[in-house]
Amino acid sequence: MTRIMGADVGDFEEVATIPCDSPPGITTLAVPINQDQAILDLFLQSLAATEASGCHVIFVVDGGCTATVDALVGWTAALSSKATAAKIFVNRHPKGWGRCISFAMEMCKSEFLVTLDSDLVLIPGWLDQLIAVATARANVGAVGGVLLYPQTGGIQHCGLAFTEDVGRHLHLNADRSVLPAEPYAVQAVVGAMCCFRMQVVRETGLMDCGYFNAYEDLDYCQRIIAGGYEVIVAPRAVSYHWERSSGIHRAFNRRANLARFWKKWGGRLQPDLWRYLERSVMRMARDSPDCLTHTYVGVDLCQARADARNIWPTLNRAGFAVAHVVDASACIPDEGDIWLPRVLGHDGHRERRPYVMAVDNFVRLLGNSYWAEIRRQFNGNDIVVDLYANVLPLQRLQRQSWPGVKVR
């Protein structure tokens, strides 16, 4: 068993304690903070409104200021009315997410440690759902929640899947109705809202601080799995996440963090994205059996060329007949909307057979409302498939495009 040591405890200055009379609960919440005040206030308000009683909370202000500490003291006083104890620590010089969580691991005396980003807006029931899944089976090492974009309500995170050389957030931007009803195992979840069993933490050790402000959480999931435990998604533990990329030097260190992760784990990761995509295709076939009676024309709009080739065999395995594939990937812009009239030509909407359009993420096809309208005169059964395991009808996607995102 690995003893948890080495979080540089002396570098973390305790500046406030909010005691309570109750004994330590089964859960400690760890909250690193490097955030602007407005977003932090939203998080603290949601934490006070939704957090169950009897928890311990460890706030670590990672390079913060006096105003941030003062705001935390006010909010933690409100938490104490729910029999919640809180401690506030400050790093005068930021140390990054991994060091802050390692410090919380050292301090934790509870059965579970839940990591929370300070740009969440927590939805009632999030903690109960995490703990319920974490306690359901003894071999569960970590449980991640479902995170939604506050701007759209679409899925931001519900677990990661991998191909041979890239990791992707499953069902990115999709409606949460696509999620399974029951908890499911994945290879990684993010630490923005994640519950760790402390017994597993003691065996696994601290975060790898060779990373800085990214990929520590994905690395830790791999270490948990290598130790024989499962990483699970709790589909009913849901919150909003602004994804403000809080913390210093995140963009600068991204390449080094990514290289470190793949160097350590590239040989162990399983290319499981196609399994999730096949499930999504089969779900569409189950819900709309008529889609299996068509012969489709494939349109390849993917920038990720190595992964694009796996889409068509996946469709075939699920029973979809694709007559041929038009490789239009050279015609699409590097970013922004993909306009189908430019890709398919002025008369592309007249194709009598339905299209299967493969794209990196389905949101790139949002700007085609008029094309979809005239397309319905010839065929209304086109399907969009993307590299985040999303599958949906093109016509439904266009109905979701209003009111758009452009601001003049």
Image (cartoon, rainbow, N blue to C red):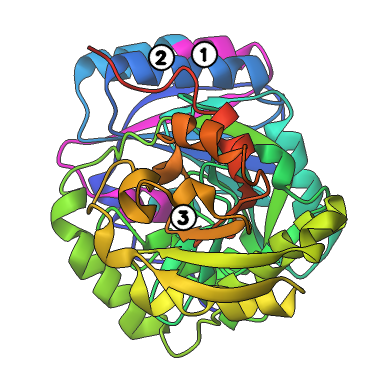
Query: SS at mark 3?
Result: helix
Q: Residues within 10 Å of mark 1 (few under 14, many from 20)?
A: some
Q: Residue at x 58, y 16 (%)?
A: 48
Could you say which quadrant of the image residue 360 lies in?
A: bottom left
Give the spatial CA distance, label 1 vs label 2.
6 Å
Q: Residue at x 63, y 36 (%)?
A: 396
**Measured along the vertical axis of the image, is residue 82 above or below residue 173?**
above
Q: Which residue is mark 1?
A: 45
Residue toward you, 110 or 214? 214
The residue labelled by disc 2 is 41
Magenta residue check for 17: no
Tag 3 residue: 106
Image coordinates for residue 12, horizontal then vertical, percent: 28, 43
Q: Is residue 82 magenta?
A: yes
Report the magenta residues as a range.
75-102
Picture layout, residue 295 above or below residue 189: below
Q: Is residue 262 left or right of residue 173?
A: left
- CA–CA distance between discs 1 and 3? 27 Å
Label 2 SS: helix
